[in-house]
Image (cartoon, rainbow, N blue to C red):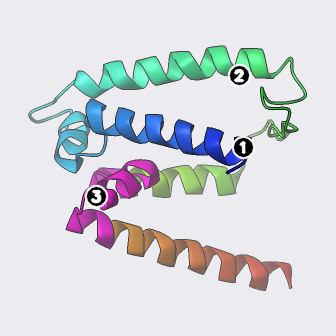
Amino acid sequence: MNRYNLSAFAVGLVFGLGLLMSGLANPAKVLAFLDLAGDWDPSLALVMGAAIAVGLVTFAIVKRRNTSLLGAPLRLPTVKHLDKRLLLGSLAFGVGWGLAGFCPGPALVALGTGEIKALVFVVAMLAGMGLFELLEKRRAG
């Protein structure tokens, strides 16, 4: 295993464990967090706040670099405007998250724990990704 694969494995493992420990891989906890008008569970706000803080610091550092810590080239997004596709994709993501209580990362972690709902979500997610690719090919060609 090369250092890139080992690094990816270690980061993925820490990320997955963090999702499990924080409760983000538990759709009931996520749905309780999103239920502002009902029995709201604010505990995930701390998790998300910490994730945003880490992301802000990380991106501030990364913007000054051309390579990763392992020497791989960094390819940061260059688009700086909001467009219809981004807004519609964000809306679809939010609706899916609110209906299922899963988003892609936590769904994969929950799938690894044997959660049947996660299997249904991941299959639907893969079908949606396939449909997107098909529509993109039609649009481009």
Q: Which mark is residue 136?
A: none
Please provide percent x and percent y for residue 141. Answer: 86, 85
**Of callouts 1 and 3, which one flags the residue occurring earlier in the amino acid sequence?**
1
- Chief SS of the magenta region: helix
Q: Which residue is mark 2?
A: 59
Q: Amino acid at mark 2?
A: Phe
Q: Are marks 3 and 2 in contact (CB under 8 Å)?
A: no
**4 relative position to 117: left or right:** right
Q: Residue furthest front?
A: 1
Vertical relation: 86 (above or below) 56: below
Q: CA distance from mark 1 to mark 3?
A: 33 Å
Q: CA distance from mark 3 to mark 2?
A: 30 Å
Q: Which residue is mark 1?
A: 4
Q: CA distance from mark 1 to mark 2?
A: 20 Å
Please provide percent x and percent y for residue 140. Answer: 84, 78
Residue 100: name its quadrant: bottom left
**85 relative position to 44: left or right:** right
**49 relative position to 84: left or right:** left
Instruction: Check disc 2 and report its element: helix, strand or loop.
Output: helix
Of residues 96 and 124, which is closer to you in this image?
Answer: 124
Q: Which residue is mark 3?
A: 100
Instruction: Check disc 3 and report its element: helix, strand or loop.
Output: helix
Please provide percent x and percent y for residue 44. Answer: 29, 27
Foreground label between 3 and 2: 2
Vertical relation: 105 (above or below) 137: above
At horizontal 36% and vertical 52% (from top left) the residue drawn is 109
Q: Residue furthest left?
A: 39
Q: Are marks 1 and 2 in contact (CB under 8 Å)?
A: no
At horizontal 40% and vertical 74% (from top left) the residue drawn is 124
